[in-house]
Image (spheres, rainbow, N blue to C red):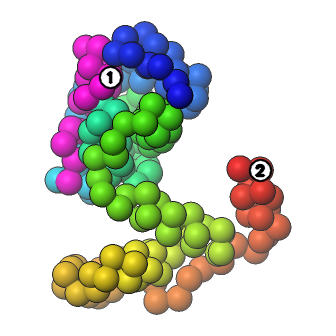
Amino acid sequence: MINLGNKYHEIAEKIKADSGINFNACLHCKTCANGCPFLAGMDYAPNAVFRLIQYKMGKAVLESSTIWICVGCNTCSSVCPMAIDIPAVMDSLRHMAIAKGVKIAEPDILNFHAEVLNTVKKYGRTHKLEIMMRYKLKKMDLFSDMGVGLKMLKKRKLDLTPSKVQDKKAIEKIFKER
């Protein structure tokens, strides 16, 4: 296990080494938070995660829900005036949390992430409807948010059939390298 302690420079350097991202360039303008479609489910806005690390509160960051709720949609990065790859930082923090043995703040989130990877492996990209159906089936919670799913279908945010990449061998290569 990696001993990160609670020292800012150790966590910051590990993030930079893992993701290649210098999150210290963040202006704390909160544009990332304004663009994030999952902010309501997070305990900290993306820029606040950076601030916690700067305040040497690494333990709070690794135990936060935010790093697990981020789905890597890149909405935050696309509006960031400093072009910080926030999902890459969140991914690095998730890896650190697992390596350190931190209790995962969001129950079943690893199952959800596994379903996302399964569709990427199968089609070369995500198929949101299949991800949600498989995840909900595993949890035996099929109807709790059916209304949201129907609204997404109506607004064409969910495709009934998956789109597939042409070069399946490239996708297989990626998964073999892991």
Q: Position of residue 151 (x, y in %)?
A: 24, 83
Q: As rendered, which of 131 and 156 lies closer to the eye? A: 131
Q: Position of residue 110 (x, y in %)?
A: 43, 57
Classify mark 2: residues with Cα within 10 Å, few (<14), some (14-19) or many (20+). few
116 sits to left or right of 154: right
Circle 2 residue = 177
Circle 1 residue = 58
Q: Residue at x 30, y 31 (%)?
A: 61
Q: Quadrant of residue 159?
A: bottom left
Main SS, magenta region, reads helix
Q: Residue at x 23, y 87 (%)?
A: 143
Classify mark 1: residues with Cα within 10 Å, few (<14), some (14-19) or many (20+). many
Q: Which residues are magenta?
A: 41-60
| In the depicted structure, whether residue 154 falls above or below residue 20 | below
Indicate the secondary structure of the residue bearing disc 1. helix
| In the depicted structure, whether residue 161 falls above or below residue 3 | below
